[in-house]
Amino acid sequence: MGISFQLSETHPQAILCLLLLSTLSSCANVPLQQKGTLGSYTGMTSSGGTLTKAKLRVDSQPVLAAKTVRILRTSTQIGSASTIQPKDLALVSNAIDRALCTDLADRFRIVTSDQPADLTVHATVTDIVATNKTVAATSTVTTLGATVAAVPVPVPRIPVGLGGLSVEAEAIAQDGSQKAAMLWSRGANMLTTPRYSRVGDAYSLSSAFSNDFSRMLVKGKDPFKGLPAIPSMQRMRVSLGGAPKYDACKAFGSAPGITGAVAGQLGLPPNWSDKGATVRQ
């Protein structure tokens, strides 16, 4: 049964504004920590956006001169105390790889991991803040059922049990020197679509990390400065479940596409629509 707000004297617009404003201060806290997975942390500077914490370094000239990229499988280093299941870690890691492959294909030619390339990209998941599945499910039911004056409206999720993601990544030249590096962390907020999975929020945030890191390599500069980029046609096609631009990206499986979008809105676990990697490189 839906939740209805009776608005005899209150304007629906005012309710919506209050709901949206309440999201600004409600997000999971994911500290930005240096976990030692990068070849070097020298010269990194603080950056980031409203929701994202980041430190980064990029050597613009060699990065912009690069033509080919190979992507090594994302690793995980989140500590023995983590309660995240290996299969869920693999799902998040592969989502990062798939998004990196798609986003970097905007400028680079992506080759398989056994081929030489101008840049080798490797990311490591260093922390996952687990999503509270029960609270996420409750938020989904509330969101799907909420109406204002008989009109369905989006309702911010319950600000409890929000998850998050932290990643370190770097791009290495053929001579072994580091040409770009990034520490990245972000927590879900009340506008992040809740999913019934302990890695629901981490999975959703994987594309945000990949977009920021890829943009740094594609543009050769801090991705948090300037206006957001409009997604390319090839990225939109792949996100809808289409074939990737390069065969090397097929190893990471197909994007869930429209089925995944619908599953997300219904709060279903990511593995309901995302079948993960097709082969191991």
Image (cartoon, rainbow, N blue to C red):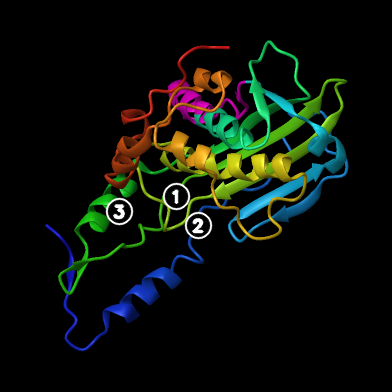
Q: Distance between the residues labelled 3 and 2?
A: 15 Å
Q: Is residue 188 above or below residue 13?
A: above
Residue 216 bears which disc, if any? none
Q: How far apart are marks 3 and 1 (CA)?
A: 11 Å
Sequence-first tag of 3 and 2:
2
Residue 196 makes an appearance in the image: no
Q: Where is residue 277 in the image (x, y as percent from the top left)?
A: 47, 19
Please report the residue visible at 73 percent of the width from the left and 54 percent of the height from the top: 47
Task: Give the residue number, with chain letter if any, for mark 3.
Answer: 139
| Residue 159 sits in quarter | bottom left
Residue found farthest to the front: 233
Sequence-first tag of 2 and 1:
2
Task: Give the residue number, with chain letter if any, for mark 1.
Answer: 162
| Three-letter amino acid code at the position of disc 1 | Leu
Q: Give the range drawn in magenta.
A: 73-94
Front-most of residues 236 and 173: 236
Front-most of residues 226 and 197: 226
Task: Give the residue number, with chain letter if any, for mark 2.
Answer: 27
Q: Residues within 10 Å of mark 1 (few under 14, many from 20)?
A: many
Q: Residues within 10 Å of mark 2 (few under 14, many from 20)?
A: many
Q: Is residue 247 above or below residue 134?
A: above
Q: How far apart are marks 2 and 1 (CA)?
A: 7 Å
Disc 1, SS:
loop
Apparent side of residue 20 relative to residue 221 in the rendered image (left or right): left
Q: Does the magenta stretch include residue 82?
A: yes
